[in-house]
Amino acid sequence: MRSLVRLSAEGEGFVPPSSNDFNLPPIFGDNAFTTKPIVMVFFSVILISIFFIAASRKAAVVPSKLQFAGESIYAFVRNDLARDVIGHEFMRFVPYLFTLFTFILTNNLFGIVPLLQFPTMSRVSFPYVLAVFTFVVFHYVGIRKQGLGKYLKDIMFMPGVPKPVYILLTPIELATFFLVRPLTLSLRLFANMFAGHLLLLVFIMGGDHLLKGVIGLKLVSPFAFAFGIGLTFFEFMVQCLQAYIFTLLTALYIAGALADEH
């Protein structure tokens, strides 16, 4: 054990990845606005815009492969996430849900794209901002539909509940709507992207370290790389799933705000 500690201290042992690997220095200049995650977020906006402009530029009755891909993504968000969840008022929320889904999905997938290999949603500030947008949207929708007084009353005093129960239930409901929802929405996305990328770093960097070791360790290294490749496919599913869950919960919150009683 002491020898392992000594080797690590001398820079010869394996140093596992940590949260410090997510704090990247500026690509150029000397400010926090030119780091890799910030640049990748702007790049994702450009990439998404180019893709959907190209997909819809020469729209035809018989769609091209690019048009079919773009329309399939839009139809999925429009029908499965907006219409089926929100109901007859769904169309005015489709642009927001569509933007949210494609933005999160693209930034998640950056984590397995060669050369980029960093999911920007693993930096918690980005999920926080997205959760704030959703928070503002569904509360605004509820207040505009029902009025501030009725909206808050329905949150604090759930119908059909004995009055003494409100002593316990009202603070819980207020915390749920104004604190728990945005926090869980953002932290779920962040934690999944952070943990998934950290696991990939462990196996890929571990395999590379074993490959440089003695013959016995070299024989083990392919297993580490194999686990890393397997986790990459698993991470792809998680990245897609988290974009779906974030958008689905946003639609559910909007649907709840539009309901007469929530």
Image: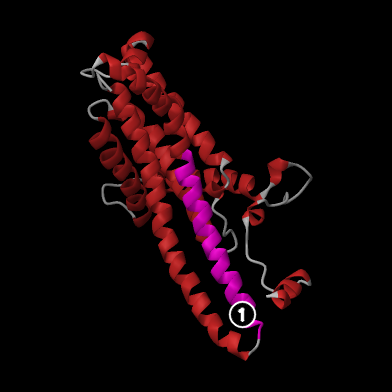
From the viewer's side, name the closer residue of 51 and 215: 215
Residue range in magenta is 186-213
Q: Quadrant of the C terminus?
A: top left
220 with respect to 63 (left or right)? right
The x, y position of residue 114, in whole percent, is 55, 64
Indicate whether 142 appears above or below 86. above
Q: What residue occupies the far front of the structure in this picture?
A: 164
Residue 247 image position (x, y, % from top left)? 38, 40
Asked whether residue 144 appears in the rendered view, the answer is: no
Residue at which label 1 appears: 210
Residue positioned 75% across, 42% down in the render: 31
Residue at the (41%, 48%) spot, across then down: 242
Q: Amino acid at mark 1?
A: Leu
Q: Is residue 185 above or below residue 26?
A: above
Q: Is residue 187 magenta?
A: yes
Count of all numbered marks drawn on residues in the image: 1
Question: Residue 246 appears in which quarter of the rendering?
Answer: top left
Residue 42, given in percent of the width and then of the height, sits at 59, 43
What residue do we see at 63% from left, 44% from top? 38
Q: Is residue 42 visible?
A: yes
- Main SS, magenta region, reads helix
Tell me the quarter of the image containing the N terminus. bottom right
Is residue 39 magenta-colored?
Answer: no
